[in-house]
Image: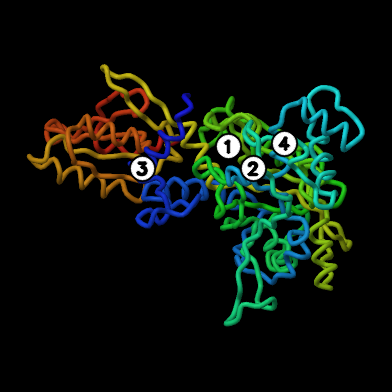
Amino acid sequence: MSSDLMDKLTSLAKRRGFVFQSSEIYGGLASTWDYGPLGVELKRNVKNRWWRDMVTARENIVGLDAAILMNPKVWEASGHVEQFHDPLVDDRNSQKRYRLDHLLASQTPELLSKLATELLGRAPEGPPDPDTLTALTEAILAQEDVDLNSLGLLADGKAADWTLPRQFNLMLKTHLGPTEDEGSLTYLRPETAQGIFVNFLNVQAAARQRLPFGIAQIGKAFRNEITTGNFIFRTREFEQMEMEFFVRPGQTTKWLEYWTDERLNWYISLGITPGNLRVRPHGPDELAHYSTACNDVEYRFPFMQKGDDSEGWGELEGIADRGTYDLQRHAEFSGKKLSFMDPGLNEKVLPAVVESSAGVDRTVLALLTDAYHEEEVKGEVRVVLRLSPAMAPITVAVFPLVNRDGMPERAHQLVDDLMGDFAAFYDAGGSIGRRYRRQDEAGTPFGITIDGQTSEDQTVTIRDRDSMAQERISLDKVKVWLREKMG
């Protein structure tokens, strides 16, 4: 696909009601988005599918819906207050802000080799690897009043005037109560996982679960990201689908492998092209403070620039071995024992955890990106979203061929009959060809036309979105036909 795919997607998203710029009439707010009528249905389909496959269809995973606001001690125990920050520098010339480690990664190999020799006492063999970049970042931050300008770092290939590096915590702060002081400070959660960990014993006892078992939830999270962009890929407000799977210590390796395979196959089941998906293990320098191993399920986004998320590959989900870190920390900070007598083991145990953490918004973007196609039909460009029928916001659109001779009434009657079993939509505006094109852009897989023949023999024409092939079937067989196509 061409490099202007992002512009095409954002235009289509607004035109067809998938995603709108938030607060648009006031000029918008950077990197905030609202989901329109079709977008909210697509998003709901993703979440419903995840909940079905992760919770409803499994005997040993149960659900939870924890609060967004939590006691601030939760975030001290989790390590987010201490660890969840990025080193920032500003270029006074351009007024642009950079993460120091990202800035270093964008420098020439020659400059990085020179810096490694000066600051680390060694020159890397070949292009600097992630470990060298991490070591360089730490070495620079360790210096008091370091002058970045003396290091010769470039900003987007140009000379810069750098400020001193500083650490920036990514959690969004707020205050509870009538006064804004240190005692009222709390945070909007940067992840949904901690709500699961602090409720671990409550859920285990109420649901009478034994190891291994999981706790899942879907909810909003907030991060004060320095660099946002690529439409809904990286935003400060986003939605997560997370599952914490509790196992005996020492068994996380096999479960990490199991859930990595499960989650990769789940994205394929949504209709995403397998060749556009991959699993990438984290290097030692990438691991979060709570994790000893992590695999990312990534999608190849063609509009991402080189250097951003590994040249086009962007994370959809992380599957992480969190060990016993979280439960141990919460036991330490709260003074409450979080081990329990597991009936299957007949001994007290503090479980280890394998986490599956997926982004709802990124999954939606991957679906839209993968489904977007352009093709020439009779000298015109046809834009079509080839969403799988199970994911499409509208399953079937019903058209009266003309707005007379009882056709609108019959079309409405069919829509009423289909609703409840399928996401059905009535469309009578414009020529039949124009209506087809609108539904193609909306990703609607099937179109049914009520015409003059319908009143004679009770048959309708069904059009397939992708092939544009049409076939005539009896009205009383429409539901069966659609169910077969839904799979």
Q: Which residue is mark 3?
A: 394
Q: Which residue is mark 2?
A: 317
Instruction: Kindly identify the amino acid type of the residue bearing the numbered disc 2.
Output: Glu
Extreme-right residue of the structure = 121
Secondary element at tag 1: helix
Q: Residues within 10 Å of mark 4 (few under 14, many from 20)?
A: many
Secondary element at tag 4: loop
Instruction: Kindly identify the amino acid type of the residue bearing the numbered disc 4.
Output: Leu
Which mark, residue 292?
A: none
**Distance Cα–Cα, label 3 vs label 1:** 20 Å
Look at 86% across and 60% down and name the residue there.
Answer: 349
Looking at the image, tell me whether mark 4 or mark 3 is earlier in sequence order.
Answer: 4
Which mark, residue 267?
A: 1
Q: Quadrant of residue 283?
A: top right
Look at 27% across and 17% down and name the residue there.
Answer: 379
Looking at the image, tell me whether mark 3 or mark 2 is earlier in sequence order.
Answer: 2
Q: Which residue is mark 4?
A: 153
Q: Please give left or right for residue 454 compared with residue 417 in the image.
A: left
Above or below 182: residue 349: above
Secondary element at tag 2: strand
**Distance Cα–Cα, label 4 vs label 3:** 51 Å
Q: Residues within 10 Å of mark 1 (few under 14, many from 20)?
A: many
- Which of discs 4 and 3 lies nearer the camera? The answer is 4
**Distance Cα–Cα, label 2 vs label 4:** 33 Å
Look at 83% across and 67% down and name the residue there.
Answer: 331
Secondary element at tag 3: loop
